[in-house]
Amino acid sequence: MIKTLPLILFMFFATGAIGQVIGRVDKRTKEFYIHTDLAMPYRVFGYQLANAQSRKMICFSSRAQDVASNSSSCLLGAYFDTGKLNTGDKIVYLGRYGTFGKMKYISRKGKKTIFYLPKSSFRV
């Protein structure tokens, strides 16, 4: 019983870190935000299709190695938060798509790219 309690506590906190909501969508503008002032580590990928097996398009991570090297070769890059996006770039929430949220990355030059984020990683 004594050995079981630490294991249960570890599983409780580990599950919370994996399922942590890290982003939010502004209800008025539909713009997507992630802030780095989170207490727990995080790593979330946006995918080309609404399927976690499809190509990784963007990464938001608290791990410096993920961001510095873009180790997953994400087309849109790897960032700590949305404040680190290129100046003038933004992400807009288009709506729910199954267990994913459909997002649009808009560059300052006007190029638009659709990608999908797991719905469990942000709230509207």
Image (cartoon, rainbow, N blue to C red):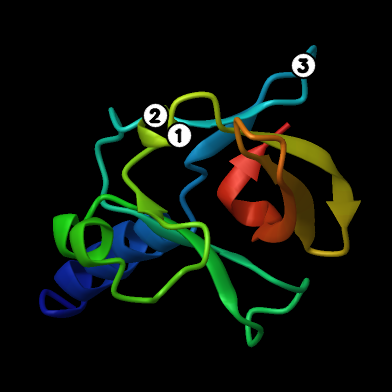
Q: Amino acid at mark 1?
A: Thr
Disc with the residue nearer the chain's start (2 vs 1) = 2
Disc 2 crowd rating (10 Å Cα; few below 14, some 14-19, many 20+) is few
Mark closer to the observer (2, 3): 3
Is mark 2 in CB contact (under 8 Å) with mark 3? no
Report, in whole angstroms, how far the alpha carbon at label 2 lies from the one at label 1: 7 Å
Q: How many numbered badges does the structure rendering display?
A: 3
- Label 3: which residue? 29
Question: Callout 2: helix, strand or loop?
Answer: loop
Disc with the residue nearer the chain's start (3 vs 1) = 3
Quarter where residue 86 is shown: top left
Mark closer to the observer (2, 1): 1
Question: Callout 3: helix, strand or loop?
Answer: loop
Residue 116, percent from left and from top:
71, 60
Disc with the residue nearer the chain's start (2 vs 3) = 3
The residue depicted at 60 percent of the width and 30 percent of the height is 108
**Residue 71 horizontal side relative to residue 117, left or right:** left
Q: Amino acid at mark 3?
A: Thr
Is mark 2 in CB contact (under 8 Å) with mark 1? yes
- Label 1: which residue? 82
Residue 76, percent from left and from top:
52, 57
Camera-side residue of 90 and 30: 90
- Label 2: which residue? 35
Q: Amino acid at mark 2?
A: His
**Residue 2 horizontal side relative to residue 44, left or right:** left
Residue 6, percent from left and from top:
15, 68
Going by the picture, which residue comes out furthest to the bottom?
53
94 shown above or below 99: above
Disc 1 crowd rating (10 Å Cα; few below 14, some 14-19, many 20+) is some
- Quarter occupied by the N terminus: bottom left
